[in-house]
Amino acid sequence: MSATNITLEDNTFADPRRRAPLVLGAAADFQAVTDRVAALAERPRPPLGWYVGFAIAVVWMLIFFGLVGYLFLTGVGVWGNNSPVFWGFPIVNFVFWVGIGHAGTLISAILFLFRQHWRTSINRFAEAMTVFAVACAGIFPAIHVGRVWLVYWLFPYPNPMGMWPNFRSPLLWDVFAVSTYATVSVLFWYLGMIPDLATLRDRAVTPLRKLLYGLFSLGWTGSARNWHVYERAYLFLAALATPLVLSVHSVVSFDFAVSQVPGWHTTIFPPYFVAGAIFSGFAMVVTLMVPARAFFGLKELVTIRHLDNMNKIILATSCMVGYAYAVEFFTAWYSGSRYELFAFVNRALGPYAWAYWTMVTCNVVVPQLLWFKYFRTTPWAMWIIVVLVNVGMWFERFVIIITSLTRDYLPSSWGLFMPTWVDFCMLAGSFGLFFTLFLLFCRYLPMVAMAEVKGVLPAARVHHHAGHDFAASTATEATAPAATDLAAGDLAATN
């Protein structure tokens, strides 16, 4: 096998003398990137597998909304929540989905600020995942309050009743945190797509597609002025979104930390929750990316090196989460509080010990396989690992919420939590909503950021040395889509 073939098949090497390519094979060309990504949205009909997956996701989404309606008509008694477990599956699912969204903002904002070019092929996936996960998360706080038709009382607006929400309530903090995070995430995701939507507009062959893509591309022309304003706005949103990665899940952790429940009242929760959120978020990105790159023919754009880098972050955050688990036990022992110590012993040895050890196995033990390059670079092996990580992170939320509530201070008030069929179906239905939105994204929008990928191609560095005159002269000779592509690569490279 020649050296060229080795480079095309494996770009995970670490050679200080040369930079590993981020795009491989025939896709390492401006026009090839456009054709490869745009073809996914331009094809008249998606593959049969897309229809099958979409049908399954839609069925579960309809089940989910049907059960929400059933909840409205019947009441929260359809869940397994009881006294003392007033928080059950709804809050477990809420914290889980909020955590899933963190990898998108980290990949898009923090890695952008640190100029990590390997993010360019995966950031669009991650941003879409963030928006859809936050959409799933936002439903549960609204429906778990009981009198759902009065949920608007949570919002601080001048109302005729002269009543204001309690600003000391962590639930209100969640309203501000999640709504802010959702707003910034949608803006960041949409702003990054504008140049790519303009490319789809210019390539559209039907009037409806040209109208819709033209409407959402906001009159993009690909001029130097457009790129200048766009890159300033993107940088501003990245700087704004970066503190949100650290603050949003910290605010969610305050739901627990400000209470007096043993096992919750601890200052380790904010950093612990943030590390866990990044951990589960990256696991979900890999979970979606591995089948998508194979199914949609994106292996040359989303390479093994991208997956390898994400797996390294998963491994690092797994070690952080495992360290937090150990520190929790030490803190409980060192505190001298019998209630605090009992809460953690009860997690490991009590009636929900099976959930605790499932959490530890999936979140701490299984990811240690990623120390080995084979597991970091073999798609089927890493996919099994990240699916188990997602399972473990859901159980982490279950363990934190349920075990602390079932046994707190007085044995006379203890009680076990038994989820109902509605709990399980709403959990599955939330995944149906998530995958419905994700499959629609894969069908109609550019899954890979074409303009950003072109900026990391070797050809873009050639244009950088040649100056802007090359792009300007080419733009006068080429068609509109090609001119946009060349200008995108040139200007992205120079910035």
Image (cartoon, rainbow, N blue to C red):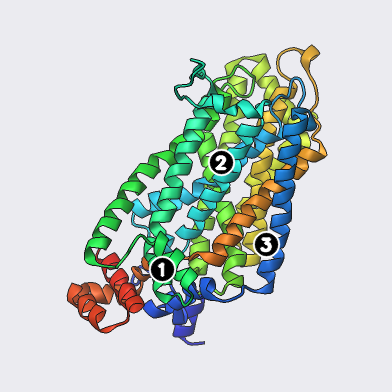
Tell me the kind of residue under disc 3: Phe
User: Residue at (80%, 21%) from the top-left corner?
Assistant: 415
**Local crowd size for mark 1, using a 10 Å CA cut-off: few (<14), some (14–19), many (≥20):** many
Q: Are marks 2 and 3 in contact (CB under 8 Å)?
A: no
Q: Amino acid at mark 1?
A: Met
Q: Does residue 322 appear in the picture of this structure?
A: no
Q: Which residue is mark 3?
A: 54
Can the viewer see residue 184?
A: yes
Mark 2 falls on what kind of element?
Answer: helix
Q: Quote the CA–CA distance across marks 2 and 1.
A: 28 Å
Q: Which residue is mark 2?
A: 98
Disc 2: CA contacts within 10 A as few (<14), some (14-19) or many (>=20): many
Residue kind at label 2, given as amino acid type: Val
Distance, label 3 to label 1, CA atoms, is 25 Å
Would you place residue 374 above or below residue 354 in this image? Answer: below
Query: Can you give x and y, in whole percent of width and height, for residue 35 in the image?
Result: 45, 78
Of badges 2 and 3, nearer the viewer stands 3
Residue ID for mark 1: 450
Seen from the viewer's position, the closer of residues 378 and 195 is 195
Q: Residue at point 65% right, 33% down?
A: 143
The residue that appears at 59% across and 26% down in the rendered structure is 330
Front residue of 190 and 491: 190
Are discs 3 and 1 less than 8 Å apart at CB?
no
Q: Secondary structure at mark 3?
A: helix
Dot 1 falls on a residue whose secondary structure is helix
Q: Which residue sits at x=35%, y=42%?
A: 240
Image coordinates for residue 379, horizontal then vertical, percent: 61, 66
Q: Are marks 2 and 1 in contact (CB under 8 Å)?
A: no
Q: State which tag comes first along the sequence, 2 or 1.
A: 2
**What separation in Å lies between label 2 and label 3 (alpha carbons)?**
23 Å
Q: In the image, is residue 84 above or below residue 39?
A: above
